[in-house]
Amino acid sequence: MQLASLSDARLLIVGDVMLDRYWFGDVARISPEAPVPVVKVARSEERPGGAANVARNVVALGAHVGLLSVVGDDEAGRHLQGLLAASGIDVSLHVDPAISTTVKLRVIGRQQQLLRIDFETSPSHEVLRAKLVEFESRLPAYDAVILSDYGKGGLAHIGEMIRMARAAGKKVLVDPKGDDFSKYAGATVVTPNRAELREVVGRWQDDAGLAGKAEALRASLGLEALLVTRSEEGMSLFHGAGAVHEQAVAREVFDVSGAGDTVIATLAVMLAGGAGWADAVHAANVAAGVVVGKLGTAVVSRDELAAALK
């Protein structure tokens, strides 16, 4: 399909947003206080992460996006709001004074991640209920919904969201977290990675074992499809008409953080733009191959995807 048609796609994203902070520096010595490297920080960078990174990926592909989430009444939340507004995202961040905005601070030395420090608390029930009301009112304006679950508490009402969206005739894509996928029942597609799937269905010995477990899970949850991202083994889509396997795109892997965001964003934009499953999965796989060649939570532009697809 033509990527030009993607600019008509409208995606509503709900989930856990975070601020990704990067401190870049040089490592020239070991600390005299403990056997750890001393990083002399030369520069810092801040990027929207989590569901906000999914939204950035959707915008980079040329589609329209609305983002619904919760932040704290703090510097990180206000900074995140500013970054998202500047990215052209129609953002609605409900402010919960009782929590701190989720921040992931990564210390990078010599192009290697040396340390990650997380700051996070779960949002309150009242704020989440208000977000659910807004979700329902916004639904008619969008073609598809992405529910980006990072396990930070922002999707406490995910079952209701799936039911509302499906009742409104919208495709629902879920990036899952945790060992209980029953809360995602009725979604169009769920996109676990290998480790996430293993946590839910147990281990498998070979491709046939994976197919059996994936198909059983898909049927039990009433999903149209299950997309399993498999790192160096590519990705596999299991749906009613059979399975679609995509080989990994061979390239130097620089950083896999945020690759799942790129996969679900590309898949959603392609499906919302009218692509079939095979084309959508192929584009998502190619986009993932591009983004792992970049440092940190990065995005793939429509031009980059078009060039890579050729």
Image (cartoon, rainbow, N blue to C red):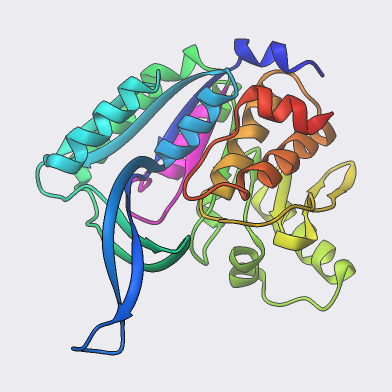
Residue that appears at 29% across and 32% down:
131
Is residue 224 in view from this perspective? no
Q: Is 80 positioned to the left or the right of 223 in the image?
A: left
Q: Count the marks: how many?
A: 0
Residue closer to the observer: 202 or 196: 196
Give the image location of residue 304, x and y in percent: 67, 29
| Magenta highlight on residue 62 | no
Give the image location of residue 135, x and y in percent: 38, 26
Residue 44, compared with residue 271, is above or below; it is: below
Q: Is 95 positioned to the left or the right of 187 in the image?
A: left
Give the image location of residue 191, x and y in percent: 63, 49
Residue closer to the observer: 184 or 299: 299
Residue 13, compared with residue 4, is above or below; it is: below
Residue closer to the observer: 204 or 165: 204
> What stretch of residues is rendered in magenta?
144-165
Quarter of image, res 78: top left
Farthest-out residue, front: 28
Q: Is 277 positioned to the left or the right of 50 in the image?
A: right
Residue 149, compared with residue 8, is above or below; it is: below
| Magenta highlight on residue 150 | yes
- Placement of the C terminus among the 4 image quadrants: top right
